[in-house]
Image: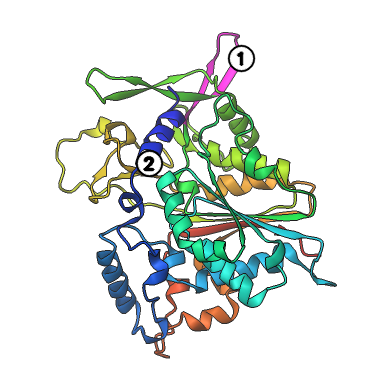
Amino acid sequence: MLVRDFIRKRLGAYFAQAHEKVVGSVNRGGALTTPSINFKTLMGRWHFQRVVSKLYEETNGQWLTPVELFRPHYSNILTDYIIEHAIKSVKNGIEKCKHLHIIELGAGRGTHAYLVIERLRQKYPEVLPSLKYTIVEASLSLIELQQNILQPLLQDDINIKFIRRDLGMLENDENRYDEFLRCGDNDEQVVVFALEVFDNLPHDKVVRSHSKNDNGQECSVMQVELVHGEEPGDYNEYVCEMKDSLISRICGDIEHSPVYAPGRHIGDSRWVPSVACNFIRELYRSHPDALLFVADFDWLPSPDLTSESDYDAADFDYSDGAPLITDMSKRDYPSYRNAPEFCDILFPTDFLTLSKYTGSLLRGSSQDVYVYKQGEFFQKFGGDELSLTKSFLPLTNYNPLIEEFENFSVMTTSKRKN
């Protein structure tokens, strides 16, 4: 079995649970019904962290995204950004001929979708009549939660579509993305949001090698597969000749880049964001002018195993880009191979490889790809919203929107400025 398929099945089982086991036991209205943080009253970083800790207690220890913690300002800035960089024309303002089609991958509780549409209603009402908003979600329970939260907008005849689709399910189906990537027309400007999504997409594991295959050809990269071990639920990895067409194509596309690993030494292994790369490739095959906006973890901590003593060195995954495996009781595991079924599998997003790969797809087009630390992005594009997330204490000059989430980065594509 390909490691990618194993990861996909495990993530599928995790996200198939009831939504409160995935995104927390907030009320049915989601984060939108709880008071937002009054940033001006914060007395500094310690105060912000105390407020966030209390919010986590109220959601039974589950995760809250930057979109929810910094609402509505986070989503407002992203909405302004896509209007400025995807829709606006210097001469004509909003392009009347371009209909905005927003595709959000993995929309969580639906908070960002709600806030984006509200921002468009308030600041860019001319965009709203032709707006299409498509949510692509693998979890049926999360779709039900999103529909509940977005119900007021549905009653206002906003064109919102929900598509249940697992982006990682690729085998024997080359048209997995047709329903939402190839359903528009030439008058659409497509914008894709992937906020904390790529870290949860299946990856492939590969190993650097200079062996030869059965045909005598050099194999610079080999793929890793899984076999069942001696005990139930036990799995072992083995390295074999590159046979998977997706891994082969992705590795072939990025192998000559100086950022490509599995490493510069024979035997080095690494995780490759093959599913994310495949989605980006299909996106730009369908919509060469699409704007892609990715925000995600660029680094994750090592697993916290201080209370565990029954693991040995062979249980750990030392590969470059290895995922963090954790369950909702806050217990971490050393590897995906020895974790129970219902665990979150979080990969540090490889922005360097993704940006190089995206850049190769955009070569010769009118678009460029940019990578920022999240705070750097908001500092550059935050505009007036930054004053609303800043502490009132002049001596601290503390702004959590810029200074927190230091392990977050942003990758975006936009039209090249002449």
Instruction: Verify whether residue 207 appears in magenta.
Output: yes
Q: Quadrant of the C terminus?
A: bottom right
Q: Quadrant of the N terminus?
A: top left
Compared to residue 378, the image places residue 158 above or below, namely above
Instruction: Verify whether residue 402 appears in magenta.
Output: no
Callout 2, which amino acid? Ala
Q: Is residue 350 visible?
A: yes
Coloring applied to the structure: rainbow
Q: Residue at x 32, y 23 (%)?
A: 236
User: CA–CA distance between discs 2 and 1?
Assistant: 43 Å
12 vs 377, left or right, is left
Q: Earlier in the sequence, mark 2 or mark 1?
A: 2
100 vs 337, left or right, is right
Main SS category, magenta section: strand
Residue 362: x and y in percent read: 73, 47
Residue 100: x and y in percent read: 70, 60
Q: Which residue is more in the foreground, 157 or 325?
A: 157
Residue extending farthest front: 155
7 vs 127, left or right, is left
Q: Which residue is mark 1?
A: 217
Pointer 1 local density, CA inside 10 Å: few below 14, some 14–19, many at least 20: few
Q: Residue at x 80, y 47 (%)?
A: 364
Q: Residue at x 62, y 73 (%)?
A: 121
Q: Which residue is mark 2?
A: 16
In the image, the segment drawn in magenta is 205-220
Mark 2 lies on a secondary structure that is: loop
